[in-house]
Image (cartoon, helix red, strand yellow):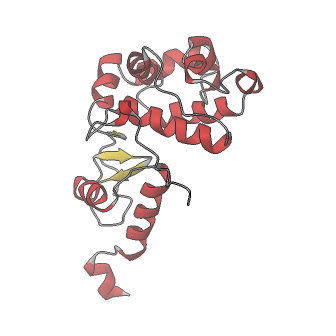
Amino acid sequence: MAPVVRKARPKWMEDDAPSPDKVLFAWAQEERCRRFPGAIPEAPPPGWATWYADALAAVGGDEGRLRAAWLAWLEDAWGQARQPVCAARAFVGAEVWRRHVPGQGGAEAGSAGAAQLSPAEARRRAQLSVGRGEEPSAPCATGCGGVSSLVVWGHPLCRACAARLEADVPRLTTDSVSGWVASRACGALPAALEVMR
């Protein structure tokens, strides 16, 4: 009988509440291994946390643009020719990652993104909590009637729903958060609207 092999969490992800840069890196490795099944997950390259804060500031605090840049990197022929394939240490080079950011086409786009949020504000938002950035005054994506104060994996959530998400979903990924939000949105009509139906 073959022994059961369990995937151990990488040592760098052993924190109870990993920092946003570690969460982004873990997501990037998941996407990389999904795209290239033979790829071996990497550890964050030296300077990843500093790169994350600076890159987040450069894109105006929008982590979604960094995620889109990573997905574009996975499709890059030059990156696929590297060994290891589409390595993070190659991606963090300023001339590499910036080329893959949607809407980042040149110096003007970079300065426009930086004008949206100062580097200090972007760093502050990056450190708020795992996978979140602030987006006040948007309606909560669950339809609970609350006003969002957080964006979790691209979904604006109120603090109460964000707390429920963390309690309900043990591992936050793009798919698990989207599934949880969709399940809540289907049955989360406020009582007043429920009576009107």
Asked whether 7 or 85 is in front, the reply is: 7
Judged left or right of residue 184, residue 88 is right
Judged left or right of residue 75, residue 33 is left
Which residue is situated farthest in the front direction here?
1
Quarter in which the N terminus is drawn: bottom right
Image spot of residue 163 (x, y percent): 24, 55
Quarter in which the C terminus is drawn: bottom left
**Image: 189 above or below 110:** below
**Image: 45 above or below 9:** above
The answer to which image quadrant residue 94 occupies is top right
How many numbered discs sit on the rendered protein?
0
Image spot of residue 119 (x, y percent): 35, 17
Asked whether 131 or 11 is in front, the reply is: 11
Name the residue rendered at 28%, 38% in the picture: 129
Name the residue rendered at 45%, 49% in the picture: 173
Image spot of residue 188 (x, y percent): 34, 73
Name the residue rendered at 59%, 30% in the picture: 69
Name the residue rendered at 41%, 24% in the picture: 116
**Image: 117 above or below 191:** above
Is residue 163 in sight in this rendering?
yes
Asked whether 126 or 147 is in front, the reply is: 126
Is residue 107 in sight in this rendering?
no
The answer to which image quadrant residue 102 occupies is top right
Image spot of residue 142 (x, y percent): 36, 63
Judged left or right of residue 3, residue 135 is left
Asked whether 40 or 117 is in front, the reply is: 40
Judged left or right of residue 122, residue 175 is right
